[in-house]
């Protein structure tokens, strides 16, 4: 008689679970390590560096604070409002601007996008 119990050799898993997985989810998957992937990663880092420079040099102090807290520290607009002593609505305006006469006006994100276009910063 074998000392191994075959009931423990396999763990039953529903086939539907495996249908949801992509190739990248498998344990043996290794992302391609080719020149294209490395070049794309380098380009992404270059773009992020340029965006960080725009954020540091071109935004108002209040916009900079809101961007840092929202995107880099993961704070909610309510939390940022409490930290900065302003309302959540004002935080939203600093981040995303407002719509006036059908046009988006102000906001750090709009300013960053405009400067990226002006400076030729293109996302990979």
Image (cartoon, grey):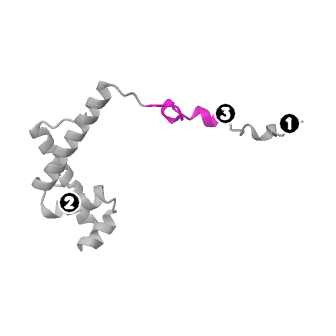
Using the rendered image of the protein, determine whether residue 102 is visible from the camera's viewpoint: no
Residue sitting at the far top: 35
- Which image quadrant for residue 32? top left
| Residue 86 % position (x, y) | 23, 71
| Residue 48 % position (x, y) | 22, 44
Q: Which residue is mark 1?
A: 2
Taking the spot 33% from the left edge, 68% from the top edge, the residue there is 79
Q: Which residue is mark 2?
A: 94
Indicate which label's residue lies in the foreground, 3 or 1: 1
* C-alpha gap between disc 3 and disc 1: 30 Å
| Residue segment shown in magenta | 16-30
Taking the spot 14% from the left edge, 49% from the top edge, the residue there is 53
**Which quarter of the rendering shows the C terminus?**
top left
Taking the spot 9% from the left edge, 39% from the top edge, the residue there is 118
Front-lying residue, 28 or 4: 4
Residue 88 among those drawn in magenta: no
Name the disc covering residue 15, or none.
3
* C-alpha gap between disc 3 and disc 2: 48 Å
Indicate which label's residue lies in the foreground, 2 or 1: 1
* C-alpha gap between disc 2 and disc 1: 70 Å
Q: Is residue 62 left or right of residue 37?
A: left
SS at badge 1:
loop
């Amino acid at each position: 008689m074998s000392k191994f119990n075959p009931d423990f050799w396999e763990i039953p898993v529903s086939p539907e679970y495996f249908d949801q997985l992509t190739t990248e989810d498998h344990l043996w998957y290794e992302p391609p390590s080719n020149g294209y992937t490395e070049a794309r990663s380098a380009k992404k880092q270059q773009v992020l560096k340029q965006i960080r420079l725009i954020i540091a040099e071109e935004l108002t102090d209040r916009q900079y604070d809101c961007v840092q807290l929202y995107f880099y520290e993961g704070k909610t607009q309510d939390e940022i409002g409490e930290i900065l002593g302003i309302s959540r609505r004002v935080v939203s305006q600093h981040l995303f601007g407002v719509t006036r006469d059908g046009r988006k006006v102000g906001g750090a994100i709009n300013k960053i996008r405009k400067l990226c276009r002006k400076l030729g910063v293109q996302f990979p």
